[in-house]
Image: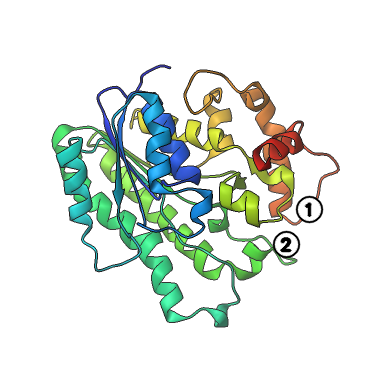
Amino acid sequence: MGRTCEGRVALVTGASRGIGKAIAHRLAAEGASVAICSRPQPGLADLGTLDQAVADLKSTGSKIVGIPFDLSDPANDLSQLVAQVETELGQIDILVNNAAAGGFKPFMDWSDSGIEKILQLNFWVPWKLIREVLPQMRERGEGWIINLSSATAIAPEGPPFPPTGPASMGTMYGGSKAFLDRWTASLGVEAGADGIAVNTLAPQAAAATEVLLAHSNLPDELYEPLETMAEAALALATASPAELTGRITYSLELLAELNRPTFTLDGTEELSDWAPSTLPARIAIMKAHSRGEREGQQASNVPDLLKTLRG
């Protein structure tokens, strides 16, 4: 382990499982003290809870704090969440806005309440949390902010348009993530002058979260392991804002650009199957799918990876 986050404090939202938990694990393995939060009683609790995540992350030896907090409720005061982190761990150096809501529906099927929930989690929560931590980061002249986004933010190309759900029914989820990308980019430009890196990070196509593996039927070649998302997040959480800020990044493309190997979440072993040299072929296949195309071959080892993860 490189201990590149030694002495820093991180807050990761929506981290009871999946991408958030993986990023929190990687940051903790690099020496960060990490606060994670999630709903007190998340759905699909059999796939991961806040208490289980805290227990797993403590194996890193770093200080871990789990905070039950329902970010989807606009009545909850986000300043209280930040204050609790500061009381238990100190001022926040790294903020990872991972909590989100989504779904694909025809335009007329969206209810106002459904739209409000998505805007609360995908816009208002990251916006308000950044407003809580940005002044202290500016005062110290240092900070890292990562907003988790999605490839659904990319507008479909056509006509003819690809026959995919995100292309035809991505109005709300894709729209909210496109908005997230755009305002994050401008904030990154603004804050970079203050020594603060602000970027978005999205899976190249789909991250192999517990929920997706259990409940989706995506082709295996669209998945990447949680380790690649965590490694890309670590790169953004330790980067110089002179080099990486105001960027809309995708996990595999970022790792290939930086020629950065992917390590296990505890930072002890390199994943050779996901070395930088293997990534261009995987990226090409994922992009072909987004265009509605199916290439004739899969990237090597992806089906075996998914069998292991699903097992």
Question: Looking at the image, which residue sits at the far right?
Answer: 296
Residue position for label 2: 162
- Where 309 falls versus 260 (above or below)? below
Residue 90 in view of the camera: yes
Q: Quadrant of the N terminus?
A: top left
Say what amino acid the circle numbered 2 marks.
Pro
Name the quadrant containing residue 5: top left
Q: Position of residue 264 (x, y in %)?
A: 53, 26
Q: Residues within 10 Å of mark 1 (few under 14, many from 20)?
A: few
- Label pair 1/2, CB-CB below 8 angstroms: yes
Query: Closest to the observer: 151 or 223?
Result: 223
Query: Closest to the observer: 190 or 81?
Result: 81
Say what amino acid the circle numbered 1 marks.
Glu
On screen, residue 33 versus residue 170, left or right, reads left
Q: Where is residue 202 in the image (x, y as percent from the top left)?
A: 51, 46
Residue position for label 1: 293
- The secondary element bearing badge 2 is classed as loop
Question: Looking at the image, which residue sits at the far bottom?
Answer: 108
Query: Closest to the observer: 123 or 9?
Result: 9
Colour scheme of this structure image? rainbow
Residue 244 in view of the camera: no
On screen, residue 77 versus residue 224, left or right, reads left
Query: Closest to the observer: 19 or 107?
Result: 19
Residue at 22% from the left image edge and 36% from the top image edge: 194
- Where 16 falls versus 2 (above or below)? below
- The secondary element bearing badge 1 is classed as loop
Q: Which mark identifies residue 176?
A: none
Count of residue discs? 2
- Where 206 falls versus 304 (above or below)? below
Residue at 68% from the left image edge and 32% from the top image edge: 280
Q: Quadrant of the C terminus?
A: top right
